[in-house]
Image (spheres, grey):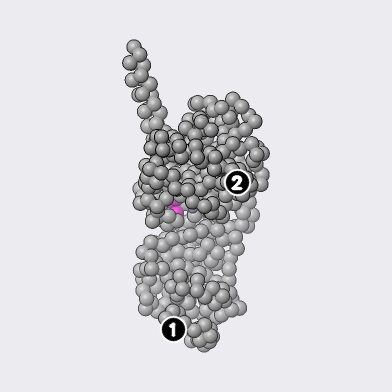
Amino acid sequence: MKRILIILLAFFAVQLQAQDLTHYKQIVKELSSSKYKGRGYAYDGANKAGKFIEKEFVKAGVDEVICQPFKLDINTFPGKMSFSVDGKKLTPGVDFTLREFSPGVKGTFKLYHIDTKNYDSEKLFADLARPENHNSFVVCDFWFSYKHTADFQRLQSKDGSTNAGIIFTWTDPILKFYKAYGEKVIDKPVLWAAASFPADAKSVTLDIENEFLKDYECFNVIAKVEGKCHDACYVFTAHYDHLGVLGKKTYYPGAHDNASGTAAIITLAAHYAENQPEYDIYFIAFSGEDAYLRGSEWYATHPIVPLEQIKYLFNLDMIGDNNPVQYCEVSDPGMDGFKLMEDINTANGYFKSLNRAELAGNSDHYPFAQRGVPCIFLENEGGDAFKYYHTVFDTWKTSYTDSYAPTFKLVTDFIEKY
Ligand SMILES: [Zn+2]
């Protein structure tokens, strides 16, 4: 009898784990689908994803779900998105992308290639001032621009030079669209072209539309599972927004960044809704992260429970990779907890190791770390999915589920012991 019970319990334990992984996969797949348009601001992609997440929390059986609105100004590219070089059509996201603060542009333009080997700032601007070079697009290696930032600022401003815009070329075959955050629009279009852009190109034809959204309303989704005690709480955070669209057809799926972390906190909410925790637990899906931590900044300045009550905060951002070494950042007050987490990890071998680096202000734990909250940022980076970071190739198919179970076990064990 006892043996049957053990087998049954083992069966249910496996069942529970398998159930979570299935649920996790479903959510990552859903959020990275075309339905949510890259979870940006054009076509209300992020807000549609937020509504889906709200429903998922309710289905998970949590005690309460709140949507917390906030506003942002943001530049988007919802419309036309065509770019040809010497008559050859380029593919958005693959052959080219735009800087987040770029205005739209329409027309055919001559190209002016900057001579990076014999660079002479004075000669460049004198050359561009000649009538035959008026209204041309300047082409230059992106990294070179870092050596002459003042000149490139000038090339971007309408009073600084007569060029129509800038095309930065990359030696990288995969184009990375580093940020979604355009809180303003600059004077001239700035594009990025992949390594496939011909070095001797003569002209480009562009038809690109931008739309600047002023005071655009988006929202964080906050779910609560009540514990036995209410004077302290744990918090799980993950951002659900991503980079949005490049025109009508191309979107940034963001499976690894960060459908993965969002899916994980929904399955954690379901787990705790079934197994009442000692303390209250909040699950916060932030919007506006890839627009420079806007949702988490808003929450940290408008918390629904005082930040001092947080025993520990776990920020899961990008756990859809396959590196057996787990990257993390920890706030100073979180260091005691981190030691416990390392012990748990070593004892159980969830990850090969936890690789802790200094705090950097690039994910949602940061506004909390700055305010003295004990917190950890868990990101599985540097595996096979990392090369697709902030590209249109960050899809359900190129992301991994390897680090989901170890992350889940690590944080749930921690909450039991901390
Ligand atoms: Zn991101």
Residue 118 tag number = 1
| Residue 330 at x, y percent in the picture | 53, 46
| Residue 371 at x, y percent in the picture | 63, 47
The front one of 6 and 70 is 6
**Residue positioned 55% across, 67% down in the render:** 103
Main SS type for the magenta part?
Answer: loop
User: Dot 2 surroundings within 10 Å: few (below 14), some, or many (20 or more)?
Assistant: many
Is residue 131 placed above or below 348 in the rendered structure? below
Residue 319 quadrant: top left
| Residue 379 at x, y percent in the picture | 46, 47
The front one of 417 and 215 is 417
Is residue 77 placed above or below 39 in the rendered structure? below
| Residue 239 at x, y percent in the picture | 52, 46
Give the spatial CA distance, label 2 vs label 1.
48 Å
In magenta stretch: residue 87? no
Residue 256 tag number = none
**Residue positioned 45% across, 37% down in the render:** 343
Looking at the image, can residue 257 be seen? yes
**Residue positioned 56% across, 42% down in the render:** 334
Is residue 190 placed above or below 289 in the rendered structure? below
Which is more N-terminal, label 1 or label 2? 1
Residue 200 quadrant: bottom left
For the residue marked with disc 1, what is the amino acid?
Answer: Asn
For the residue marked with disc 2, what is the amino acid?
Answer: Phe
- Considering the numbered disc 2 on the image, is that residue within a helix, a strand or a loop? helix
Q: Magenta residues? A: 251-255
**Residue positioned 50% across, 74% down in the render:** 147
Quadrant including the N terminus: top left
Residue 368 tag number = 2
